[in-house]
Image (cartoon, rainbow, N blue to C red):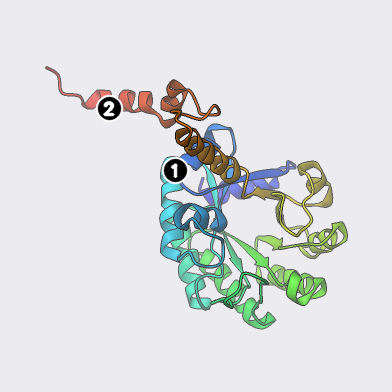
Amino acid sequence: MTAPDRLRALLKKPDFVVMPAVWDGLTAKLCAGAGFDTAFLSGSCIAASRLGGPDLDLVSFGEMFDSFNMVHGAAPDLLVLADGDHGYGNAMNVQRTVRAYGRAGAAAVLIEDKITPRALTSAGKPCLPRQEARMKIRAAVEAAKDSGILVLARTDCRPTQGIDEAVARIEMYVEEGADILFLDSPADEGEIKRAVAAAKGKPSFAVLSPGAPRSTPSQTEAAALGFKIGTYPTVMLSPATAGMKAGLAALKAGGAAATSALPPPELRATLGYDDYDVQAKPFVLKA
């Protein structure tokens, strides 16, 4: 069964799907080892890890795709939803993005309606005109037929154009054949319910990490509101950053490791040193 088919089967089950965000081989391996079936290849996490910077459309398709290959190589059974951003150009660029992720083994790909290149400010998310956004999702759905990869259609227009326009876009994306729908930045439960209803029974996706100016219900609340998938972009990134800061602070203070550091045997086991020896044994030359 292909990754997209496995994800389709998972989404038919009644359970709420918790999708941690990953950005490299280690985070993918940890995610799979913790028992998660799915993960979100997060653009914000990749911007943080590769650039040491914010998620402001600075990461290229090549960098995102390279990160996907690291994730998929380290945890090949993990069902990965790849962040395809705005498709990195026009509708034809969208098709290239979708086909590349489909061939590489992604289960789903996200395509959004933000304008690119963005204005030279970190504020706001100006979006394409509605019909141009329609053509991008139409192109994505057409390209997805090659591999069966699922298309997640995201609208970012709520903050700049209002909830009515955002709901209209979700309805339009359903008409175009998107498999999963995503309203970014809902203000409250009422807006969430409108967006879920507009999806007409197709799975709705939400970002549930705290801290951003949006409604962030708990897992139980999200499921009750009708969300099917919840992703958490900061669930590993934030504590990992805190841990690295703690390690550096310990060195500056004259120590060798932070109190929160893993014991060396546990770190070696997590990284798979013993597994390597087992896998290499058949190829060791006999004396």
User: Dot 1: what SS?
Assistant: helix
The answer to whether one can see residue 286 in this image is yes
User: Dot 2: what SS?
Assistant: helix
| Residue 136 lies in quadrant | bottom right
Q: Nearer the viewer, mark 1 or mark 2?
A: 1
The answer to whether marks 1 and 2 mark residues whose Cβ atoms lie closer than 8 Å is no
Q: Residue at x 70, y 61 (%)?
A: 182
Q: Which mark is residue 25?
A: 1
| Residue 191 lies in quadrant | bottom right
The answer to whether one can see residue 108 in this image is no
Q: Is residue 249 left or right of residue 238?
A: left
Total marks shown come to 2
For the C terminus, the quadrant is top left
Q: Is residue 90 left or right of residue 13?
A: left
| Amino acid at the residue labelled 1 | Gly
How packed is label 2: few (under 14 Cα within 10 Å), some, or many (20 or more)? few
| Amino acid at the residue labelled 2 | Ala
